Amino acid sequence: MARTQDLPATFGYPACRVVEKRVWILDMEWKGRRGSSNVEDARGRSGGGGSIGGGMGMGLLSLIGRKFGIKGILIAGVAFLLLWKMGIVDLNMLMGGSPVASSPAKISPEEQERFEFVKVVLADTERVWTEEFSRVGEQYSEPVMQVYRGRTQTACGAGSAEMGPFYCPGDRKVYIDLGFYDALAQTFKSPGDFAQAYVIAHEVGHHVQHLLGTSEKVAAKRGQPDYNEWSVRLELQADFLAGVWAKHNSGYLERGDIEEAMRAANAIGDDAIQKKSQGRVVPHSFTHGTSEQRMRWFNKGLKSGKIEDGDTFSMPYSQL
Ligand SMILES: [Zn+2]
């Protein structure tokens, strides 16, 4: 029976094949390659509490204004500036923005390496989708990826690390807390670079769906009894799109286990779905489809490499 060790050492698509329901693919060679410039490093920023601080600051000022008039506000302003100069208060608190950490975040070499890694993966998606969109006569607009820690503010509401990586259509950003990869490594023995790259490719897939208007069509089904099915179709298509990304990057991929990658991504919460109607982010409360379905659609993308072959919406649900 063919197992991974029987596969040729230099295989890539089309030699890449299903072996006992598993797909073996090359892991990633990424060092020394170009990273994306669309990455926002928000690791030194705390997303929590900013609006509360701002609200308090402004509330206090209007109270002083009512009681003591403009003179009172001026005196309070001078006092605030003095306190700010002495480093006791944060100017951002008054302005309503997020307080900026006064000392730069401590970043370990391992974390920095992950940061460089996700930049390269994002650059790969930019290249692939720019080519694919132009092939079908469309223009791709690149998403921004925000790397944050703990909590962050998004156009879709508050995001937190527990949600895992997610995409917010409201600001066209992919959000990721690199600690997600620690969780991935703790739960699975060796998730490998491929699993780490796959979750980004899947989220960028949601961005592609947003550009094509697919996500919004599915969002419009919210509240209908078959909404869950529409969501699964959307998720499987994002897996297909991740497969298209993998096909175009097969030169950089090394042996790894896609099924494990997908199971890993699934088990750690995967992405969170943005609730556009309510303007907030909520973790997944529905299934993405079985891991077998996800692998099948990923494989379809890997085989075809073409954006138009990923129609998960026309076929009967039972045949997905
Ligand atoms: Zn998803």
Image (spheres, rainbow, N blue to C red):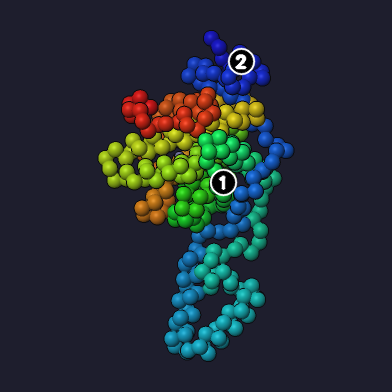
Judge depth for marks 2 and 1 and give the one in front. 1
Q: Is residue 317 above or below residue 66?
A: above
Q: Is residue 220 left or right of residue 138?
A: left
Nearer to us in this view, 243 or 163: 243
Nearer to us in this view, 88 or 192: 192
Few, some or many residues within 10 Å of mark 1 (<14, 14–19, 20+):
many
Nearer to us in this view, 162 or 27: 27
Kind of residue indicated by mark 1? Glu
Q: Residue drawn 59% across and 17% down?
A: 15
Rendering coords of residue 55 (x, y %): 46, 71
Q: Is residue 199 visible?
A: no
Q: Earlier in the sequence, mark 2 or mark 1?
A: 2
Q: Residue drawn 62% across and 75% down?
A: 84
Rendering coords of residue 79 (x, y %): 59, 82
Q: CA distance from mark 2 to mark 1?
A: 36 Å
Q: Quadrant of residue 181?
A: top right
Few, some or many residues within 10 Å of mark 2 (<14, 14–19, 20+):
some
The residue where tag 1 is placed is: 142
Secondary structure under badge 1? loop
The residue where tag 2 is placed is: 7
Q: Is residue 154 above or below residue 316?
A: below
Secondary structure under badge 2? loop
Q: Is residue 231 left or right of residue 73?
A: left
Rendering coords of residue 269 (x, y %): 46, 40
Rendering coords of residue 309 (x, y %): 47, 29
Kind of residue indicated by mark 2? Leu
Quarter occupied by the C terminus = top left
